[in-house]
Image (cartoon, coloured by chain):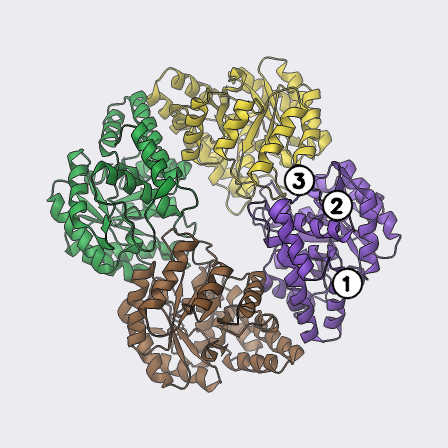
Chain colours: A yellow, B purple, C brown, D green
Amino acid sequence: MDTRFTGVIPPVITPFKHGEVDLDSLRRVVEFLIGSGVHGLFVGGSSGEVAYLTDSQRDAVISAVVEYASGRVPVLAGAIDTTAHRVIEQARRAEALGADAVVAACPFYALNDAAEIADHFRAIAAAISVPLLAYDVPVRLNGKKLDRDMLVTLGVEGALAGVKDSSGDDVGFRRLVAANAAAGHPLALLTGHECVVDGMLLLGGDGCVPGYGNVEPGAYVELWEAARAGRWDEARRIQDRLCAGFEIVFVPRGRSGDASGIGAFKTVMAAQGTIDANEMAFPVRALEGASREGVLAIARSQGLI
Amino acid sequence: MDTRFTGVIPPVITPFKHGEVDLDSLRRVVEFLIGSGVHGLFVGGSSGEVAYLTDSQRDAVISAVVEYASGRVPVLAGAIDTTAHRVIEQARRAEALGADAVVAACPFYALNDAAEIADHFRAIAAAISVPLLAYDVPVRLNGKKLDRDMLVTLGVEGALAGVKDSSGDDVGFRRLVAANAAAGHPLALLTGHECVVDGMLLLGGDGCVPGYGNVEPGAYVELWEAARAGRWDEARRIQDRLCAGFEIVFVPRGRSGDASGIGAFKTVMAAQGTIDANEMAFPVRALEGASREGVLAIARSQGLI
Amino acid sequence: MDTRFTGVIPPVITPFKHGEVDLDSLRRVVEFLIGSGVHGLFVGGSSGEVAYLTDSQRDAVISAVVEYASGRVPVLAGAIDTTAHRVIEQARRAEALGADAVVAACPFYALNDAAEIADHFRAIAAAISVPLLAYDVPVRLNGKKLDRDMLVTLGVEGALAGVKDSSGDDVGFRRLVAANAAAGHPLALLTGHECVVDGMLLLGGDGCVPGYGNVEPGAYVELWEAARAGRWDEARRIQDRLCAGFEIVFVPRGRSGDASGIGAFKTVMAAQGTIDANEMAFPVRALEGASREGVLAIARSQGLI
Amino acid sequence: MDTRFTGVIPPVITPFKHGEVDLDSLRRVVEFLIGSGVHGLFVGGSSGEVAYLTDSQRDAVISAVVEYASGRVPVLAGAIDTTAHRVIEQARRAEALGADAVVAACPFYALNDAAEIADHFRAIAAAISVPLLAYDVPVRLNGKKLDRDMLVTLGVEGALAGVKDSSGDDVGFRRLVAANAAAGHPLALLTGHECVVDGMLLLGGDGCVPGYGNVEPGAYVELWEAARAGRWDEARRIQDRLCAGFEIVFVPRGRSGDASGIGAFKTVMAAQGTIDANEMAFPVRALEGASREGVLAIARSQGLI
């Protein structure tokens, strides 16, 4: 297993201002995260609103984060597009811009089967020189869940270096951990769920990619250290506090999934001063009114602002 | 309603040879379709394997079809990407290459609500000079179905010129036809389901975008003419024959959705000589063995080859 | 094919008053339907709120409708329960009470495969002396759609006499019609969708089971007759008028599926005087306030009240 | 919280022989479970094939288990039917037969909203004298997930004494645990997932209802005790061993969900001698051939037989 892809690796949000990516705020986000002790940065993920960024915006974000990180922690870059040939174009640009690894999802819009999906990952891995991680996120991808045995096989082949599991299928994650261990642990297995990191580390996960880690990175690092030391009751208490803060994403009523989740993170981060504004990528409108107030009320009660 | 977007408008398949788009075969496809009397061509749709084409391949296909069509019929081009700003880049290139209209889906990978989706279409329409049609295809897009009232509102606003409905929701299509009629018929309403064109025309649809029309375009033109003349029993008989041929897509066992559907079309087209090979875009493998034989057996029994 | 199971066979709603089945109102419903010329009655279906009725209430309803119908039209009775042995108990009681046929769904709550589902239907058929029809209603049954080939096989075997298709899958219905015809037409194929009866008859359906037929049975009979005579434009006009009335089910906001659909039917029927009240089975509350007014406004504009 | 509903409470499988419930085997199952130290028994659950049992079979099972348990541990009985009035009939019979508590799911087949579902549970609770637990099992119930706030509200009201959560939504379970704690812990919160009991106890769950507990009840009791004592690494090791055994449910290929899961449990239990045969309720066929051999191979490698 490549130990660069373990620990706490937050998916970096993308700040916006007046409709453009706000690189000054992005620099502050990176400093905040690295200063809090995170072990890596994942740019161009769902929390980074990658689906909304044009190619030139994606490049600007990767390039900036690589520069800001200056080698202090590895930078993983999402290469998100519908199928392999398109993903490869994204992935090669990310590699050229300095990303230490690429994260790619299974095909979407396309309707593929298991063999085609395996070939998809193989082709991407073969086209780049940096490691490839698979991104399992059925809620965005037509319910498509990556097959456990395929992932481990690709790990053994050397095509995959890890998996970011945002499937919310904890039984599946445990089975993946067991199969990976039985195969010699080729894959770094990261949970994408910020609310169950304690349990996922207990069962043998190698790290986490918590969107809410943009708001409270230090607490995730403490949770990670408690878990590494086997202080599970402490890990659970930290996770419970994090979950109490994470309730911000359930506050907005009548808003979309992205507006509620990423919007809530940004709203607290703006109040914390990490970013200038809680602006979202078009066409998502920033949280405002009662949604914004409700988010800030929780953040205040948790001592975050 | 813009009458250019009515009648039979097949989604043109994209032939491949040795891993590359086969423009010679594509020229023959275009001639076959136009020679059969179709009223328009839709390039860059799901049947055109748009999700698998790189931007340069997409451009090559649009450019070639525009050239081959030479203004004989309108050319609609799919601009398929995750969100508005990315779609706009696709759409502008398509317009620059000579497309007569652009077809765009709702956001995907992103998690948006109704207001955000409406703004998505408005922004795309505002960024191009040619008409925009909405593409409703929940089976590829996380189950997201376009809202009837939103579509009609965007039609009245002038943002949308039509809808390609591949949702398989016939009750929804009828309700859309009724609401569109009540609003003055701003939208051209096209069904994407090749098996129920007779019924969709009976209830007031303005045309069809039949993937299977790549195989039997002339029969769809006859069906359209029978329907226009109110010869519904004849329309039904033609549709029944077309459905008997369409059974080819159910033949392949254990293959993906795209391999089965588009792969079956291509397999018959190759046997007909319209294209050189039944090759698919990577990573989909061409139909072969029993799947290919089964497809050809049906085609033979229907007199297609 | 058993011609008793063709034509217009409305799923009879179950009137309630003060928490009990209102048999007086039920008698008026039966008279209204038969007087309008329907060809059969289906009791104990989803529109009859069968899921909410205790066994003794189910028996009372079947018994009453058999008595009221007095042999003027066949009475089909739903035998709705989770698996075969439980369904058989329901089915035998229905047969003993005088039902002319039994309608059963695939197993639910249970997680079965195709072979088990076929055996389920075979066992039910073998346990009763009256014909059995299969009820395909994925929206209520975990998305489970009955397999076309299984249905036709069971028809050929004599286990099934027909299918009530409420799957909303028009391509599937057409394929079922074609396979049934090829097998000698053993099954009576009825669509459960009240909005597309014209199209489903055009493609070869044998009849319909329209929930909205409780409100406008006579129009469905006219539609049936127009279709039988090949007057498709007239059929379509009648269907369009019916759809305009059917818009009542989309009026209630923030109410459940059953409250909106069956509740809207009952609200108009109460205003028409067919039933005493628009009361629903517990725990569904009757439509009231803006929902009720909106439903009645449409009914008024359509001349139904 | 009612402490009777904490700890390890396996859902008791229902043995069959020659098509009938095998009460002799059932007695051995009960002795095996109680002898292994479990804290309660849940009869009439999904693992008990409740959906396949007629009312008289359900009664016989409840009655037998109550007799066999003889008050040594509490007996919870599933009252599984479509809606409240039908569930109440089941629940009252269970209570009369000696069940210490009733477990009921949300309505199914019916299409209800949140308010209707709350009234459903209230009505059931009001109709019985023993405590009521809610059963959250979306995979069997059309994807319907019980709302967290509703559950806690019903707990505070006294209508619900607990929840069996088989939703597989670990974030949801953690949020439920937190909300329940904030409300004074009225509900006993039990996870239904046998593979993540360690993590669910770590985050604050009150117990488990593991189907696989029919095969290895003693290990679940050890896991429970390790967790109670804060020995989380030990708990995790026990859980990992249990998961290695639980792999039996993934062995059968091409079989239904119930045949694979419950069928695998029964196959090992028969080999262990706890029950006479691995027979399933009609129409599910027992595992045989390669499926049976594969299951037994795992059981052998785990030292279970």
Q: Mark 2 falls on what kind of element?
A: loop
The disc at residue B60 is none
From what the image shows, is residue D188 above or below residue C240?
Answer: above
Say whether residue D231 is visible.
yes
Amino acid type of the residue tagged 3 in the rendering: Phe
Residue C157 location, x and y as percent? 43, 67
Q: Quadrant of residue A238?
A: top left
Please tell me which of labels 1 and 2 falls first in the chain. Answer: 2
Tag nearer the camera, 3 or 1 = 1
In the picture of the structure, the residue carrying the numbered disc 2 is: B14
Residue C25 location, x and y as percent? 36, 80
- Mark 1 and mark 2, same subunit? yes
- Mark 3 and mark 1, same subunit? no
The disc at residue B218 is 1
Work out how far the residue at label 1 is from the one at label 2, CA to CA, in angstroms.
19 Å
Mark 2 closeness class: few <14, some 14–19, many ≥20 residues within 10 Å: many
Which chain letter goes with mark 3?
A
Viewer-proximal residue among C116 and D239? C116
On the rendered image, what quadrant is the N terminus of chain B found in?
bottom right
From what the image shows, is residue A28 above or below residue D176?
Answer: above
Tag nearer the camera, 2 or 3 = 2
Q: Mark 1 falls on what kind of element?
A: helix
In the picture of the structure, the residue carrying the numbered disc 3 is: A282
Amino acid type of the residue tagged 1 in the rendering: Gly
Residue positioned 18% across, 45% down in the render: D25
Residue A24 location, x and y as percent? 66, 23
Q: Mark 3 falls on what kind of element?
A: loop
Which chain letter goes with mark 2?
B
Mark 1 closeness class: few <14, some 14–19, many ≥20 residues within 10 Å: some
